[in-house]
């Protein structure tokens, strides 16, 4: 999978697969269906919607790594993101419209194929309600070249300012409406923090990598993530669908905290020096490569299995691992090779020239282990 803009970080694909796995497990038998528990498996699956947060942190991270020391051609950048996202996204939108029993009018369809598909409620009534995240992702793509330019000009304080502004807006929304859960969860007002934290993660990755290279750092970051989700589930009485969630002020800060938690885990994992078995690494890289298709197709598949074999929920984890997940991987593999990959050859280089401003921010980490393979991210 050829990229004209960056080298390939194999462990980044591991994390992409993990994010898709969390979301799929959550939709199969997570969220409100699980009883609160201190079991780490239960905790992460019960709050598995956080896989979306991890995806968005990783997006901000890898795009900023690509832009380090460079200037971007805006039109070519947006074109590349369109080619990467929209072939599969449009396929799913057409399926969503067809599955809606002809209740979609022309204006709704235009909204669905636009970058503001997460505005309104149609998507939630289809078989593909999770696709709202793609709209939020693309909204970030439209502003990212400006953000990375301002990062070069004003430094990290600009990104801190964006996060502070987002926190302020969510605070004002909560004071006005006594709730901010929808804005925090399903719009860029809540998710912009996570992209920005990913951008800051890229700065740390390039300049302070040794802080996270110890196995102890990975353990601490995982424990920190576990403790946060235990606390979050407890204070909301069950996460997004919890009894105390809708009017809980925790949603003002939870997108930011989730982003920081996952940035710590990702930084530590990417910087580990130990090697995993080659077969496992290759398998996880492959699964990470098809993670977009996995995310797009998982919801109708878990719904199908839930309806055809409701008894699977008795031991949901075994059913998920040995029945549902293989089905998701099989469909996603076919989708990847038929819908996604053929468009990769149409991508172009969007890097214009080195940027002296960005070169000042990013000090290349010469000890960084980068795979000779090439990334499908862009």
Image: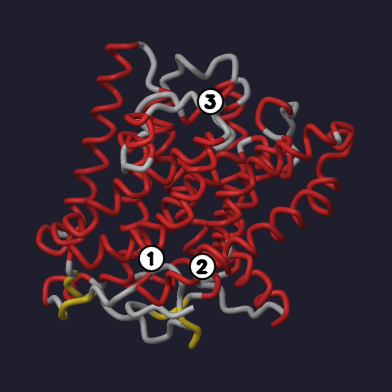
Front one among 336 and 321: 336
Quadrant (top left/top right/bottom left/bottom right) for the C terminus: bottom left
Q: Is residue 37 above or below residue 349?
A: above
Decide which of tag 2 and tag 3 comes sooner along the chain. 2
Q: Secondary structure at mark 3?
A: helix
- Residue name at image x 79 percent, y 47 percent: 320
Mark 3 nearby-residue class (10 Å; few <14, some 14–19, many ≥20) = few
Q: Which residue is mark 1?
A: 62
Q: Is residue 369 above or below residue 38?
A: below
- Residue name at image x 44 percent, y 34 percent: 254
Front one among 376 and 58: 376
Query: Residue 253, located in which quarter of the rendered image?
Result: top left
The label on residue 12 is 2
Mark 2 nearby-residue class (10 Å; few <14, some 14–19, many ≥20) = many
Using the numbered discs, state the Cα–Cα distance from disc 2 to disc 3 in whole angstroms.
33 Å
Q: Which residue is mark 3?
A: 125
Q: Secondary structure at mark 2?
A: helix
Using the numbered discs, state the Cα–Cα distance from disc 2 to disc 1 in whole angstroms.
9 Å
Task: Give the image location of residue 226, x and y in percent.
Answer: 62, 43
Using the numbered discs, state the Cα–Cα distance from disc 3 to disc 1 in whole angstroms.
33 Å
Decide which of tag 2 and tag 1 comes sooner along the chain. 2
Query: Residue 28, located in which quarter of the rendered image?
Result: top right
Task: Give the image location of residue 152, x and y in percent.
Answer: 15, 64
Q: Is residue 310 above or below residue 8?
A: above
Asked if marks 2 and 1 touch (Cβ < 8 Å), the reply is yes
Q: Is residue 157 above or below residue 277?
A: above
Camera-near label (2 vs 3) is: 3
Tally the marks.
3
Task: Give the image location of residue 91, x and y in percent.
Answer: 49, 50
């Amino acid at each position: 999978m050829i990229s004209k803009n960056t080298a390939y970080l194999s462990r980044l694909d591991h994390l992409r697969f993990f994010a898709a796995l969390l979301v799929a497990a959550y939709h199969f038998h997570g969220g409100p269906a699980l009883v609160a528990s201190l079991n780490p498996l239960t905790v992460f699956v019960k709050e598995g919607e956080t896989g979306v947060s991890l995806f968005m942190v990783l997006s901000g991270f890898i795009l900023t790594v690509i832009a380090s020391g460079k200037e971007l051609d805006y039109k070519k950048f947006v074109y590349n993101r369109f080619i990467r996202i929209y072939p599969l996204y449009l396929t799913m939108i057409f399926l969503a419209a067809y599955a809606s029993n002809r209740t979609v009018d022309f204006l709704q369809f235009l909204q669905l194929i636009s970058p503001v598909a997460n505005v309104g409620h149609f998507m939630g009534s289809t078989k593909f309600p999770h696709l709202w995240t793609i709209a939020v992702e693309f909204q970030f793509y439209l502003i990212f070249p400006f953000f990375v330019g301002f990062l070069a000009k004003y430094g990290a304080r600009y990104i801190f300012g964006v996060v502070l502004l987002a926190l302020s807006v969510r605070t004002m929304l909560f004071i006005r409406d006594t709730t901010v859960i929808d804005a925090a969860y399903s719009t860029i007002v809540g998710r912009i923090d996570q992209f920005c934290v990913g951008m800051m993660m890229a700065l740390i990755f390039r300049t302070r990598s040794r802080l996270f290279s110890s196995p102890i750092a990975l353990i601490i970051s995982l424990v920190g993530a576990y403790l946060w989700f235990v606390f979050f589930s407890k204070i909301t009485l069950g996460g997004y669908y919890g009894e105390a969630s809708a009017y809980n002020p925790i949603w003002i800060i939870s997108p930011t905290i989730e982003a920081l938690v996952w940035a710590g885990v990702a930084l530590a994992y990417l910087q580990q020096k130990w090697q995993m078995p080659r077969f496992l690494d290759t398998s996880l890289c492959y699964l990470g490569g098809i993670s977009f298709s996995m995310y797009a197709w998982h919801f109708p598949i878990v719904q199908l299995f839930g309806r055809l074999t409701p008894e699977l929920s008795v031991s949901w984890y075994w059913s998920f691992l040995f029945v549902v997940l293989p089905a998701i991987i099989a469909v996603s593999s076919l989708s990847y090779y038929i819908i996604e990959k053929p468009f990769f050859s149409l991508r172009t280089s969007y890097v214009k020239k080195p940027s002296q401003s960005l070169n000042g921010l990013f000090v290349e980490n010469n000890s960084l282990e980068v795979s000779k393979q090439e990334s499908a991210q862009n």
